[in-house]
Amino acid sequence: DQQVKQNSPSLSVQEGRISILNCDYTNSMFDYFLWYKKYPAEGPTFLISISSIKDKNEDGRFTVFLNKSAKHLSLHIVPSQPGDSAVYFCAASGFNSGGSNYKLTFGKGTLLTVNP
Amino acid sequence: KAGVTQTPRYLIKTRGQQVTLSCSPISGHRSVSWYQQTPGQGLQFLFEYFSETQRNKGNFPGRFSGRQFSNSRSEMNVSTLELGDSALYLCASSSGLKNIQYFGAGTRLSVL
């Protein structure tokens, strides 16, 4: 059962435009959401996070939006730069449905390509 | 502060062998988690250790095991390697249960 889903395996945008990466989750017990960026041959790098009590968090060019009723979050990158080209992972943390395990669950990632 | 350090970076093993991977967390971090990344599967959670105790475990067979030492360094062991174990193994450390996880560069394991 995939609790965190990134339905777009890839996304291509032009430099300077907005990149919007989407993520859906199913576990209503998730209470903290994160985005990581990963370059080839490197480990994921933390980008931005949001608590379930908020609906928006902004850090420079990066903004994460959370819609709890829809169990959906998105990452906006404005303006997009070629150096943003990487795989972006959405992750959610919280207890499982049994309330016993608190852990971080990742989506499968979206490859973002920003074209000059 | 130094980041999360994983050794070795690359490993080549043959089926049936066993392997041990090492992870040194960020100084002061007591939680260490391990993940397996394969193409198209994202990051699959293996297990998490906190203060030398396994706190969480993913859905992997018993061939995958780990441990944590008193200095928070962690090792992961895979016995009786299978071809499907070829993957990037990532270690992440954090300072607490709900804190951000910081990843190492990973160990690329190839099983021939």
Image (cartoon, coloured by chain):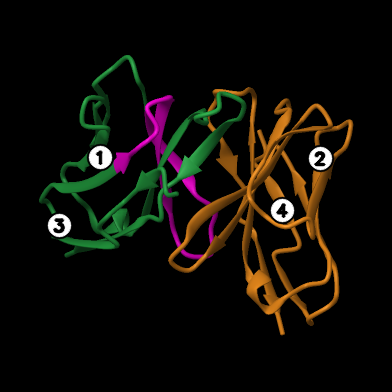
Chain colours: A green, B orange
In the image, residue B62 lies in the stretch drawn in magenta? no
Q: CA distance from mark 1 to mark 2?
A: 33 Å
Tag 1 subunit: A
Residue drawn at x 40%, y 35% as measured from the top left:
A34
In the image, residue A32 lies in the stretch drawn in magenta? yes
Where disc 3 sits, the SS reads loop
Identity, as a three-letter code, of the amino acid under mark 1: Leu
The residue singled out by tag 2 in the image is B73
Question: The C terminus of chain A lies in which quarter of the figure?
Answer: bottom left
Can you tell which mark lies on residue A75? 1
Labels 2 and 3 positioned on one and the same chain: no
Q: Are marks 1 and 3 in contact (CB under 8 Å)?
A: no
Identity, as a three-letter code, of the amino acid under mark 4: Gln
Q: CA distance from mark 3 to mark 4?
A: 34 Å
Q: Is residue B19 above or below residue A104?
A: below
Where disc 1 sits, the SS reads strand
Q: CA distance from mark 4 to mark 1?
A: 29 Å
Q: Main secondary structure of the magenta part?
A: strand
Residue drawn at x 66%, y 33% as measured from the top left:
B1
